[in-house]
Image (spheres, helix red, strand yellow):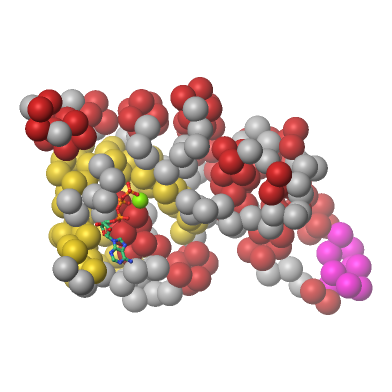
Amino acid sequence: MPVLEADGISVRFGGVQAVRDVSVHVGEWEVVGIIGPNGAGKTTLFNVLTGFQRPNTGRVRFEGDDITGEPVHRRAALGMGRTFQNVGLVKAATVLDNLLTAQHMAVGYGAVAGIVGSSLAFERERAVRDEAARLLELLGLLPVADLVAGRLPYGLRKQVELATVLATHPKVLLLDEPTSGMGPEEAEAFGERLLALRRELGLSVLMIEHHVPLVAAVCDYVYCMNFGELLVEGKPDDVRSHPEVVRAYLGDEAA
Ligand SMILES: Nc1ncnc2c1ncn2[C@@H]1O[C@H](COP(=O)(O)OP(=O)(O)OP(=O)(O)O)[C@@H](O)[C@H]1O
Ligand SMILES: [Mg+2]
């Protein structure tokens, strides 16, 4: 059974058909990519999957259940974790504190137990800190754990945001251009980390990504969108070399 499934999704904004009859699915443990030129409808499709945008047609299913009408927070609680283009961090707090805050929000920390300082609260606090350290290590962020998040370079801030999303224990991770603002080497390192995360945490991933070598290196399956429609889908190498995809990216002169 796919973890996440969208079937026949269409979204219209006034005169713009941003997404037309698009179906995608993400299986358990799969890393699935969405590529396509600017304005292809990738983010709009993402917004439908995560609940920020109601589709005009189509259904979204999570672990087999229809969630098309469910609000964003309910989807997050079910296990859908999403990162944003504009990083959602507490800028004045340290990297570690950002992570601890995200974990406490996810766990529903017993406020009273915390104040009283019961042994249960101490134990839980230790578990939360251990987990934070593990996530920071997985993402190579231990060296910056005590630095103020807002002062980090953009690429690192995106990694911290990913760590805070992982701290909420998602089953499927949705990434909208996770390597934007990174150089080629940083992007390659990110790809390796992503595969390690999948192994360690048993994640499924759906990511919009422009960096084609990264898509080829990490994705099991790829969808290419153009002008709101699904152009081609398949294994990364087949999609990358498909004449329609080449034409969509490079224009007619390439064909
Ligand atoms: N809220 C909105 N209102 C009106 N039009 C929108 C809205 N959001 C997106 N669009 C339009 O829908 C189309 C698809 O946009 P979308 O952001 O989904 O593309 P994208 O593939 O994510 O592009 P990019 O690679 O530039 O991020 C574009 O023509 C865009 O202008
Ligand atoms: Mg986009």
Count of numbered marks: 0
- Above or below residue 62? Residue 38 is above
Which residue sits at x=68%, y=41%?
A: 152
Q: Which residues are magenta?
A: 113-122
Q: Position of residue 39 (x, y in %)?
A: 26, 51
- Along the viewing direction, whichever of 232 and 129 lies nearer the viewer: 232
* Residue situated in front as seen by the camera: 51 or 116: 51
Q: Quadrant of the C terminus?
A: top left
Name the foreground residue: 119 vs 234: 234
Q: Residue at x 63, y 38 (%)?
A: 153
Q: Using the rendered image of the protein, determine whether residue 90 is visible from the camera's viewpoint.
A: yes
Q: Residue 136 in the image: state x and y as whole percent.
A: 68, 40
Residue 111 among magenta residues? no
Residue 118 lies in the magenta-colored region: yes
**x, y (%) of residue 109?**
73, 68
Q: Quadrant of residue 11?
A: bottom left
Q: Is residue 2 visible?
A: no
Residue at figure coordinates x 24%, y 50% from the top left: 40
Q: Which residue is situated farthest in the top direction here?
A: 185
Image point (40%, 63%), residue name: 50
> In the rendered view, does 210 fall on the left or right side of 19?
right
The image shows residue 96, relative to residue 68, as above or below, that is above
What type of secondary structure mainly makes up the magenta span? helix
Q: Position of residue 166 (x, y in %)?
A: 58, 50
> For residue 201, which quarter of the picture?
top right
In the shown orientation, is residue 159 left or right of residue 72?
right
Classify 71 as above or below 22: below
